[in-house]
Image (tube, coloured by chain):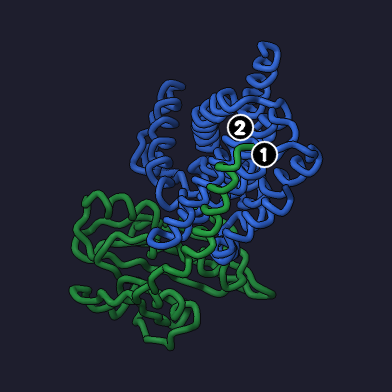
Chain colours: A green, B blue
């Protein structure tokens, strides 16, 4: 083997080992200007603000928008608003898995107003929850059944935004 | 040799945290990392005294520099991708049987936990493409179905092509299978690349056939458990078709060689 190749390899390893130390710290997301107020009610049920949990605190750390947690008496609602197409708005299933929940896909649901929601079942210990999710534009009537379907339309400028991701968590017996 | 590999892995220390974060939150979990232990097992079986292949050693070095650059200013998963590729290249540089080098490299690359981010980036366009293609197939079969974004619409019924049906996990499994076949058959770099290039359209076509078949399942009034069982069976059947195609390609290439 050529000594130059070995020397090049050693140099590359040295650079690779030290480079991560030069990574700048990540800035918190704070872009909440131009976002409308959260709705007062969803599906005819009044929303009552709840305390932020550790899941939403983790989301908030670098989320370019605003997150709200509400109860309507039967379900927990998590609303995430953003004015920019971002990879940091992702499916709530990822966050639930990171928090130790097992997630199984479920059939998409159509609500009383004909809107389509993606759905999944989350389980942990003896807890079971049906989770519904959709993304809607706050400026137009556009909506998407899941975050991935929303993201490309947002990136391509097909909807001006801002947008709100609605996540409903209903505990089941 | 082992010291060089160990030092190489140690230099990529910062990628470990990102890998843990991603796999914990990922639907595929630790399973998506399976390519790396398989690559190591094949390497350990073939390990023996041989000086490192300088081309693969230089490739491993360049990929490590790519990891270094990505570590400074790019998303962590970009750095992780470079890390896995450079690990594959350093194993390929030292494997005793040179014919296994490309397969080992591909196995290590397949272990990069990218399924979720690729799903986030490419899942929706893929689902729309699958939906359009499945609608075309169903129309050819005399069923009047229209593709509406990521949904198939027939009259007042709508069937969703949900994220799990984008075909990305199919593609990842095909990629992993291609890597194992390339290592087993000792395919050179060009033939390995041809095998991977074949896997991509093969999995798309298999996924379209799956979506078209599942359209009938979703229309029927089945309970959830039975529907999920049929989903799984159709998925396995579709992947079996892809597997047969890839194995046939490898067997034919071995005959030519």
* Residue at 24%, 78% in the rendered image: A37
Quadrant (top left, top right, bottom left, bottom right) of the C terminus of chain B: top right
- Where residue A83 appears, as percent x and y from the top left, is 24, 66
Chain ID at mark 1: B
Query: With respect to residue B130, does B24 lie above or below?
Result: below
Residue for badge 2: B238
Q: Quadrant of residue A135?
A: bottom left
The foreground one among B147 and B5 is B5
Identify the residue at image location x=42%, y=40%: B126
Q: Say whether disc 1 or disc 2 marks the residue closer to the N-terminus.
A: 1
Residue, far bottom: A51
- Foreground pick, B144 / B229: B229
Above or below B14: residue B218:
above
Element at badge 1?
A: loop
Instruction: Specify whether B228 is left or right of A169.
Output: right
Element marked by disc 2: helix
Question: What x and y, as percent, mark residue B241?
Answer: 63, 27
Crowd class of label 1 (few under 14; some 14 to 19; many from 20; radius 10 Å) = many
Q: Is residue B147 visible?
A: yes
Query: Which chain letter goes with mark 2?
Result: B
- Residue bearing the label numbered 1: B52
Q: Quadrant of residue B103?
A: top right
């Amino acid at each position: 083997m050529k000594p130059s190749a070995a020397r090049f390899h050693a140099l590359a390893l040295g650079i690779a080992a030290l480079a991560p130390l030069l990574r700048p710290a990540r800035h918190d997301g704070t872009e909440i200007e131009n976002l409308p107020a959260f709705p007062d009610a969803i599906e005819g049920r009044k929303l009552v603000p709840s305390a932020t949990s550790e899941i939403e605190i983790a989301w908030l750390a670098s989320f370019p928008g605003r997150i709200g947690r509400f109860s309507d008496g039967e379900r927990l609602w998590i609303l995430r608003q953003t004015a920019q197409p971002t990879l940091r708005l992702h499916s709530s299933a990822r966050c639930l898995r990171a928090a130790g929940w097992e997630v199984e896909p479920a059939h998409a649901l159509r609500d009383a107003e004909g809107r389509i929601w993606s759905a999944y079942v989350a389980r942990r210990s003896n807890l079971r929850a049906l989770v519904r999710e959709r993304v809607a534009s706050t400026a137009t009537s556009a909506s998407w059944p899941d975050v991935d379907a929303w993201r490309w339309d947002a990136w391509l400028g097909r909807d001006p935004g801002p947008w709100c991701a609605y996540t409903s968590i209903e505990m089941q017996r | 040799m082992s010291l060089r590999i160990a030092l190489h892995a140690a230099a990529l220390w910062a990628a470990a945290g990102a890998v843990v974060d991603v796999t914990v939150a990922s639907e595929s979990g630790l399973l998506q990392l399976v390519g790396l232990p398989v690559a190591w097992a094949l390497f350990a079986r073939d390990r023996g005294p041989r000086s490192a292949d300088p081309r693969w050693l230089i490739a491993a070095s360049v990929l490590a520099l790519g990891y270094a650059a990505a570590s400074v200013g790019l998303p962590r998963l970009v750095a992780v991708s470079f890390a896995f590729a450079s690990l594959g290249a350093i194993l390929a540089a030292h494997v005793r049987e040179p014919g296994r080098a490309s397969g080992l490299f591909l196995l290590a690359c397949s272990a990069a936990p990218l399924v979720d981010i690729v799903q986030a980036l490419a899942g929706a366009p893929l689902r729309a493409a699958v939906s359009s293609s499945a609608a075309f197939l169903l129309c050819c079969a005399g069923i009047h179905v229209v593709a509406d974004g990521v949904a198939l619409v027939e009259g007042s019924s709508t069937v969703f092509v949900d994220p799990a049906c984008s075909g990305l996990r199919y593609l990842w499994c095909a990629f992993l299978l291609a890597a194992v076949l390339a290592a087993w058959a000792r395919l050179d770099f060009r033939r390995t690349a041809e095998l991977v290039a074949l896997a991509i359209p093969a999995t798309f076509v298999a996924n379209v056939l799956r979506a078209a078949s599942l359209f009938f399942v979703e229309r029927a009034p089945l309970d959830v458990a039975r529907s999920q069982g049929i989903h799984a069976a159709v998925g396995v059947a579709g992947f079996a078709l892809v597997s047969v195609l890839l194995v046939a390609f490898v067997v034919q290439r071995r005959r030519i060689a």
